[in-house]
Image (cartoon, rainbow, N blue to C red):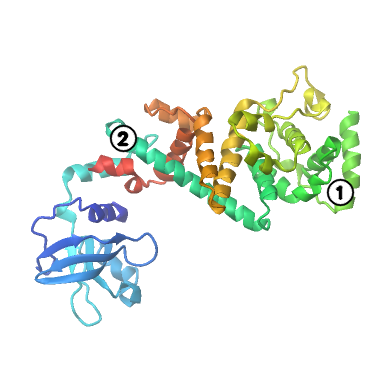
Amino acid sequence: MREDFLHYLWRWRRFDVKRLQTTDGQPLEILFPGEYNTDAGPDFFNARVRLGNTLWAGNVEIHLKASDWLLHRHDSDPAYANVILHVVLEEDQRLFRPSGERLPCLVLRDRIPPRVLDRYRRLEWERLYIPCARVYHEVPELIRINWLDRLLIERLEVRTAAVDTLLGSVGQHWEEAFYRMLARSFGLKINTAPFEQLAWALPLRILSRHQDNLFQLEALLFGQAGLLRESFRDAYPVALAKEYGFLQHKYDLQPLPAGQWKFFRLRPAGFPTVRIAQLAALLHRSTQLFTQILEAESVEAMETLLQPAVSTYWQTHFRFDKPSARRMKPLGREFVHLLLINAVVPFLFCYGRKHGKEALQLRALQLLEGLPAESNNIVREWSALGQAAEHAARTQALIHLKTQYCKAGRCLECAIGTAILR
């Protein structure tokens, strides 16, 4: 059993509250369990209880064993001086205040409803896709949908914080920050880190000087990626390597190691060489992409903005010196949708919040609702449990639920988990 289960029991009074008394025999009445504290200090602030005939207001601390009070050194911590009640599963040791007065203690071991305890143990030990998989369908749909709506906002808030941190690192330059987030998104899961490093190694201010020349943009990006160090047969990569040599000297650039790029188990359309060529084409269209995103009025307008045509060489190649019978297509719609979800939506939401423009925050939410549901392992597993996802807003919430709650065992912080325990 974990301590957070006792937090849940106390917070919602999900234990037998009849004829309560402390371990030293004082009658106990809970008037208000207190405000749940997830930071340092006692677990619940400003609780109100009646001990005997005396009304007490103060803090409540919860442990599995009473001796944990000493183990955690609360006896010498001034933050715990105002604890009026110690709630434990087991009182394995009597505790006293510095004055010599005994610290009031409530033991919950024999007051937990068997059904609640049984369901908690199942949640804690279940090894299915999610801990509550066997009873998930028993939770009323209204509770599940309301919780998923809340998780979508929570996910956007987490991503907004990431955007805010990125902005701070580039001097609040929105276009630079967006370029770096967009580049990161081009890597998806396999090449996220190298794309992110590439964007940091090649700032937008340098690329902007060459926006009108797609050849030079490709030379800069492929060169900084470390992919122009080989001996090539084709004239085009040979020319790129020569051009990069000139630009490298001009801007004092240090290329990344080529070995970090992953090609294995990727479809040719997803090779990092292809993605870099597509990123170059996108920057050739505009290095003020975020400004244009702000002006776009529809999903279709954003899709058009993010689907430029690559250079002639990359229409017949997926790697240098290896021509292909298959012709390269522009960025696929599914990939563009992932760019919208992972880069555009967080930036729109963050920009709207920082500038007090609720319409932009609403547009970010509407954008997710206007995009089709994502197709990945997490979404497919939820579908197998009967949880439908009609658009990207719902899949984003389900991904957050799985990765941040189910996987972390945070059932008692989840509205679905607590509903199961009722």
The one nearer the camera, 45 or 321, is 45
Badge 1 marks a residue whose secondary structure is helix
Mark 2 crowdedness (10 Å alpha carbons): few <14, some 14-19, many ≥20: few
Expressed as whole percent of the image width and height from the top left, the position of residue 239 reads: 91, 35
In front of the other: 104 or 95: 104
In this rendered view, identify the residue nearer to me: 18 or 117: 18
In the picture, residue 24 is in which quadrant?
bottom left
Residue 110 pos. (x, y %): 14, 53
The CA distance from mark 1 to mark 2 is 58 Å
Tell me the residue at 59%/32% (across/down). Answer: 298
- Check the image and report above or below for 93 versus 390: below
**Left or right of 251, for residue 20:** left
Question: Residue 123: which quarter of the image?
Answer: top left
Q: Is residue 166 above or below residue 370?
A: below
Q: How many marks?
A: 2
Relative to 287, 114 lies left or right: left
Residue highlighted by disc 1:
248
Query: Which amino acid does the dot numbered 2 rest on?
Result: Leu
* Residue position marked by numbered label 2 in the rendering: 142
Q: Residue at x 10, y 68 (%)?
A: 26
Which of pointers 1 and 2 indicates the residue nearer the eye? 2
Say which quarter of the image contains residue 404: top left
Q: Position of residue 21 (x, y in %)?
A: 11, 63
The amino acid on which the numbered mark 1 sits, given as a three-letter code, is Gln
Rendered position, 218 above or below 32? above
Task: Tell me which label, 1 or 2, sits earlier in the chain.
Answer: 2
For the residue pair 192 and 35, the one nearer the viewer reads as 35
Is the residue under label 2 in contact with that under label 1 (CB below 8 Å)? no
